[in-house]
Amino acid sequence: MENTSAFQNALNQLASVKDKIGLEEDVYERLQSPDRVIEVSIPVRMDNGGIKVFTGYRSQFNDARGPYKGGIRFHPNVSRDEVKALSMWMTWKTAVIDIPLGGGKGGVIVNPKELSAGELERLSRGYMRAIARFIGERIDIPAPDVYTDPRIMAWMLDEYEQIAGHKAPGVITGKPLSIGGSKARGYSTAQGGFYVLVELMKKLGLGKDSRISIQGFGNAGSNMAEILSDHGYKVVAVSDTGGGTGNPSGLNIREVEEHKKKTGSVVNFANGGNLTGDILETETDVLVLAALENAVTEKNAGKVSAKVILELANGPVSPEADKILDKNGAVVVPDILANAGGVGVSYLEQVQNSYMYYWSEEDVLEKLKEMMIRAFNDIWREKEKHKATLRQGAYILAVGRVAQAMRDRGLN
Ligand code: NAD
C-alpha cells in the first residue's frame, strides 16, 4: 500500500499559506498535483546471470519558472508518494532562491548497499535509458540525492549522451569535475546553510562565542562543522548514530573528523566528553539538524534549549514540533532555505555547462553567497510583513513566485 503521509504533509504546507497570499482557486487546484509522474521498470542483469526488474519514478511537479530540477534517490523506501512530495518541495526550493528552475524528483526502489559496483552501474544506466526521452537540458535536470553520488551521475550522463548522439553535460548536475562538474558542489549544502546562519545570527545579535551543536556528522553535518570552526565559531557538540561528543570550549573539528575516520563514530573522541543525553536536549544556543527527518517531534520539542534551529536535513522538525518551538521563542530556519545551497550550486553547474566556461571556487562561492543572502532577506521581509514564522515566510515567498509565473503564462 502506498504511504501517503509525505505528500499529504506537503499539501498541508501549501494549504497553510493559501489564504495568506490570496492564492486563487484555479492556481491552488493546479498546484496540488504534479504535472506528471513517470513510472518505469528497469531490467538489470545481475552478477549471478539472472535478470532483476527494479521500479523507478520521475515526478515532474511544476515547470512554470523553468525546467524541472531535482535529485534521484536510490533507497528501499522510495515510493510514488515520496517522489511526489519531494518534487513539490523542490519547486519551492528553487523559487525561494530565485533560480530559473522548477521542481522534480526521481527515485529507484533499491538498497544500493546490496549491489555490486557492476550491478549499480547497470541499474544507473538502465534508469537513464528508461527516463531519457522525458528529460533534457531544457526539460528536466536530475542530480544526486540520498545514496547517489558523482560516480552515478557520470554513468547516467554517459548513457544519456550515447542515446542523444551528442554531448549534453547540462542534462545532469553533481557530476565529477572531469566531465563538467562545478567547484564547491561537494560541500555546497553546508556552505549555503552557513551563509544563512551567519545572517540570522547577526540579526539576532548572536556572536561567535555562541554555542553551536550539530546532530548528524555525515556529508551535510561534518562539512557544516568544518566551515563553522574554520570561521572561528564554537561547535560545542556533534553526534552521529553511535552517540555524541562535546566540549564546552569548542571541539577541534579536524581532530573529530580524523577520529571518526579511524573509529567510524564521533564517540570516545579524546578531546571531548561523550554526551550522556540526546544532543537535541544539550544546553546550546544554535542547533543544526543534519541527520534525518522527524528528529524533533512533539515528544522532545519542549526539551530543546536552542534559540536558533537550522534545518540542514529535509524535514527534521515535525509540524507539531514547529508550533512548540515557535511558542518557546525559537527561530527555525526551514529546510527549503537552509539546505538550498546544494541546488544553488547545481544551477551554477548548469550555467557553466551552457557557457562551456568554468569558474574558480572563489567565483562559485561568491555567487552562492549572494544567492543565499538575498533569499534570506526576501524571506525575512515576508516574515515581518505577515507577522509569520521564517518557514511561513519562505512558503509565502516561494508559492507566490511560482503562482505569479503560472499567471503570467496564462496557465490559471
Ligand atoms: P549522510 O548519510 O552523509 O549523513 C547523515 C548523518 O546523520 C550520519 O552521520 C548519521 O550517523 C547521522 N544520524 C542518523 N541518525 C541519527 C540520529 N538519530 N542522531 C544523530 N545522528 C544521526 O547524509 P547527508 O548527505 O549528510 O544528509 C543529511 C540530511 O541532509 C538528509 O536529510 C538529506 O536529505 C539532507 N540534505 C543533504 C544534502 C547534501 O548535499 N548532502 C543536500 C540537501 C539536503
Image (cartoon, helix red, strand yellow):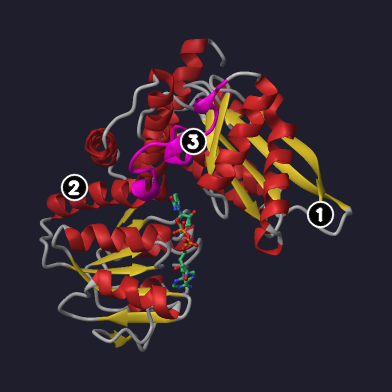
Q: Is residue 61 magenta?
A: no
**Residue located 56% across and 22% down the image:** 167
Q: Which mark is residue 199?
A: 2
Q: Residue 393: x and y, percent?
A: 34, 41
Look at the image and tell me whether residue 277 can be seen: yes
Q: Amino acid at mark 1?
A: Met
Name which residue lies at 41% across and 59% down: 219
Q: Position of residue 110 (x, y in %)?
A: 71, 55
Q: Which residue is mark 3?
A: 173
How many marks overall?
3
Instruction: Give the image location of residue 30, x and y in percent.
Output: 61, 26
Where is residue 148? Give x, y as percent.
57, 50
Q: Earlier in the sequence, mark 2 or mark 1?
A: 1
Query: Mark 1, residues whose alpha carbon is within 10 Å: few (<14), some, or many (≥20)?
Result: some
Kindly report the distance in space between the C-alpha atoms of the residues bearing marks 1 and 3: 27 Å
| 229 or 391, nearer to the observer | 229
Left or right: 32 with respect to 384? right
Q: Nearer the viewer, mark 2 or mark 3?
A: 3
- Amino acid marked by disc 2: Glu
**Range shown magenta:** 167-188
Q: Is residue 37 visible to us here?
A: no
x 42%, y 78%: residue: 265
Mark 1 touches mark 3? (CB < 8 Å)? no
Disc 2 versus disc 1: nearer the observer: 1
